[in-house]
Amino acid sequence: MGATVQARLDDKAEAALRRIARIEGWTTSEVIRECILEAAERRATKLRPRLIGAGCFDSGVADLATNKKHMEGFGKKWRVDKQGNGRWDW
């Protein structure tokens, strides 16, 4: 085994540690090792740049980015009040 780690836990963290150990059937050391590895994986995926939905498509509208009528309502949200009246809101 590698390094030995010491940590001070408040009552809430200690209860959570014992609860996880009991549910999983692990020792407290196994719980801590697994949590460290999970935290490292979460951080690694956060730091990796993710590109979602990149690509090209043809909408058939030639002036989509320049014609102001296509931008009408962009950045606004349609809201409905208690009386059922709808309006654009920033």
Image (cartoon, rainbow, N blue to C red):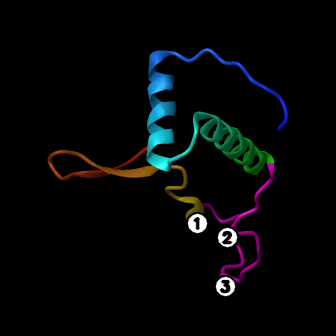
Distance, label 1 to label 3, CA atoms, is 13 Å
Q: Residues within 10 Å of mark 1 (few under 14, many from 20)?
A: few
Give 27 or 79, whichever is nearer the viewer: 27
Indicate which disc residue 78 carries.
none
- On the image, the x and y values in percent for residue 60 come to 67, 85
Give 49 or 68, whichever is nearer the viewer: 49
Give SS at disc 1.
helix
Q: Residue beneath label 1, please?
A: 70
Residue 33 against residue 56 in the figure, above or below: above
Distance, label 2 to label 1, CA atoms, is 6 Å
Residue 50 lies within the magenta run: yes
Residue 77 against residue 22 in the figure, above or below: below
- Amino acid carrying label 1: it is His
Q: Is residue 82 left or right of residue 27?
A: left
Q: Residue beneath label 2, please?
A: 64
The answer to which quarter of the image holds residue 50 is bottom right
Do the residues bearing badges 1 and 3 touch, measured as CB atoms within 8 Å? no
Residue 61 lies within the magenta run: yes
Distance, label 3 to label 2, CA atoms, is 9 Å
Indicate which disc residue 60 carries.
3
Residue 60 against residue 73 in the figure, above or below: below
Q: Residue at x 51, y 32 (%)?
A: 17
Q: Residues within 10 Å of mark 2 (few under 14, many from 20)?
A: few
Q: Hey, which residue is sitting farthest right in the picture?
A: 2
- Amino acid carrying label 2: it is Leu
For residue 34, say whether it is visible: yes
Quarter of the picture containing the N terminus is top right
Mark 2 or mark 1, earlier in chain: 2
Q: Residue at x 83, y 29 (%)?
A: 3
Q: Range of the magenta residues?
A: 48-68
User: Magenta residues: mostly which secondary structure?
Assistant: loop
